[in-house]
Structures are given as C-alpha cells and as structure tokens.
Image (spheres, rainbow, N blue to C red):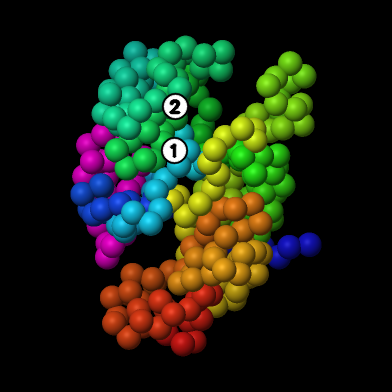
C-alpha cells in the first residue's frame, strides 16, 4: 500500500510559456474572469477564483498541448444569473480563443453551451455553461489520457489520490454505443492534495500526449515529503532534473521545496539545485 504524502498546498498546473511570464499574466488577467496574478522570479501565479495556475517564463523547448487543459465552469450561482454566466462565457471565448478552436462554441448533449479553445500561448481552455450548481471550483485542471496514455485514466488518478491524499467525487464510463470502449472513463472528478481535478480517457487516435509543456507542481516543507512523492512519481530516469520528473503515465511533475522562491534567489543555492535530479534540502 502506498504511503500518503500530502503537499503543503494543492498541486498546481504549470504552463510552459515561450516568453515572459509577467506579460502572459497580464494577458490572462485581462482575458479570464475572476483572475488576478502575483509575479515571482521567472514564475507567475495566477489566482483563478481561488485556484492557482503557474506560468513559467522559458523558451521554445516545450509548448502546451491539450493533454492538460483548463476547465472553466460558468454557473448562475457564480455570476448571478444564467444570462450573466452565458455573457461571461462568450466574452471569455472571444478574449482567449485566438489560437483556434478544438470544439466550436455551441450546444452539445452534455452542455447547453460549450467550447474548447486554444490561447495565444498554446494552452487550451474548456468553457462550460453549467446548469444549476455542482459546488465545484470555477477552474479545474483537466487531464486528457489520449494517444499512448489512453485507458490509464482510472489507474493514474487512483495512484495520485493514494499518494497525495484525496477522493473520487464522480466517475462515468462510455456507453456501449460510444466511440470508445465501455470501460473507458468518460469523465471523472476527484481531489488530490487538497485540489480538485477532472480527467478523461480520450482514445488512441490523438497525436499528442502528456509532456513538460504543462506540468504539475508539488511543494513540500521537508525532505521526507519530497522523498515520498519522488519515490512514486519518478519513473523515467532520463527525465530527472532540477526537481522535475515523469510518472508512469507520462505526466511531468515538479517536486519542490516550499521555499523554492528563496532558494532560487540565492545564487549558490540555485546553482546547486540546478545540478540535482531529486531535490536534496540538506545540500542547499
């Protein structure tokens, strides 16, 4: 049985930005409702109605793809009425979708209004008009298990919940008449490490899967937490660098100390960290 190592704060999706993170934060703060930003050293934190999204200012080595997206629930209880929720969704669609559509803005069997769009940095957003209230956050990261990761959604989320602490809130499977096999996960909502997430199996036909373009960040107060998370999540030896690792399902994780900002501001400590695979606090 896997031991549980809850992080100091909820796991946070981190978007690899080809450019300046502060500039990207201004773009997102203007395009997304209920959003404000806090700058940092190379990394900017977006607060999207209480849920964090990190922006990592970098280069063109990686770029986001739809395997991890942002799911936004526009509900009447959050925006005051159904009409105002729809207005907010349409305004967000116009502001954030300049990178193109994965699914056009229209009604679907699962939603009265929905769109899946790509922003100027390549990150994708699912805009969902919610009927009634689900009690779920406005923003949740969504994992899309496609290509070689298809069929691993349930196993992966079970692994993460066992490691970080959490529970499954819901799970629906594809029907016999679906385009995917009945045991495939149509959608699951779950918690891990104090945050709420969604995930789906998406089929082998997609030409993308998980990579460092969007990673997940875990912050720990001490070495035992880092060691415990790393022992489960790091499954690809060649991917171990500077606290980054890749798990058995292809998802990239940053397993970092809670005081990472302080460490990166110290020239000597930063140099030591950059030479590490797993972070060893005793050497910093």
Q: Is residue 2 above or below residue 17?
A: below
User: Which image quadrant: the N terminus?
Assistant: bottom right
Q: Is residue 3 left or right of residue 39?
A: right
Q: Is residue 259 visible?
A: yes
> Which residue, given by chain and number where applicable, does mark 1 sit on?
70
Q: Is residue 41 left or right of residue 14?
A: left
Q: Which span is picked out in magenta?
A: 26-49
Q: Position of residue 136 (x, y in %)?
A: 51, 34
> Which residue, given by chain and number where applicable, does mark 2 sit on?
102
For the residue pair 126 and 48, the one nearer the viewer reads as 126
In space, the residues marked 1 and 2 are separated at their CA atoms by 13 Å
Q: Is residue 200 left or right of residue 87?
A: right
**Residue placed at 42% from the left, 45% from the top?**
64
Q: Position of residue 156 (x, y in %)?
A: 67, 49
Q: Is residue 129 visible?
A: no
Q: Is residue 82 above or below residue 143?
A: above
């Amino acid at each position: 049985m896997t031991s549980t190592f809850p992080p100091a704060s909820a796991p946070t999706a981190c978007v690899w930005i080809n450019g300046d993170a502060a500039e990207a934060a201004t773009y997102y703060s203007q395009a997304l409702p209920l959003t404000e930003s806090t700058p940092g050293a190379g990394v900017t934190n977006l607060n999207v109605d209480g849920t964090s999204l990190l922006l990592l200012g970098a280069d063109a080595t990686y770029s986001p793809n739809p395997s991890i997206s942002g799911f936004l629930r526009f509900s009447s209880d959050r925006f005051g009425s159904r009409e105002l929720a729809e207005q907010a969704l349409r305004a967000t669609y116009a502001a954030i979708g300049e990178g193109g559509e994965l699914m056009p803005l229209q009604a679907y069997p699962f939603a009265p209004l929905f769109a899946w769009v790509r922003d100027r940095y390549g990150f994708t957003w699912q805009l969902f008009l919610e009927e009634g209230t689900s009690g779920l956050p406005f923003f949740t990261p969504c994992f899309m298990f496609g290509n070689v990761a298809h069929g691993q959604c349930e196993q992966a989320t079970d692994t993460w919940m066992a490691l970080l602490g959490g529970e499954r809130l819901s799970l629906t499977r594809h029907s016999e008449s679906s385009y995917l096999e009945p045991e495939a996960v149509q959608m699951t909502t779950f918690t891990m490490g104090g945050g709420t997430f969604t995930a789906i199996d998406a089929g082998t036909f997609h030409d993308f899967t998980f990579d460092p373009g969007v990673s997940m960040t875990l912050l720990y107060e001490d070495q035992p937490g880092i060691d415990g998370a790393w022992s489960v999540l790091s499954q690809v030896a060649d991917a171990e660098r500077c606290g980054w690792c890749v798990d058995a399902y292809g998802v990239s994780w940053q397993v970092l100390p809670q005081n990472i900002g302080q460490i990166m501001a110290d020239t000597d400590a930063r140099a030591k960290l950059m030479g590490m695979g797993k972070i060893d606090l005793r050497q910093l």
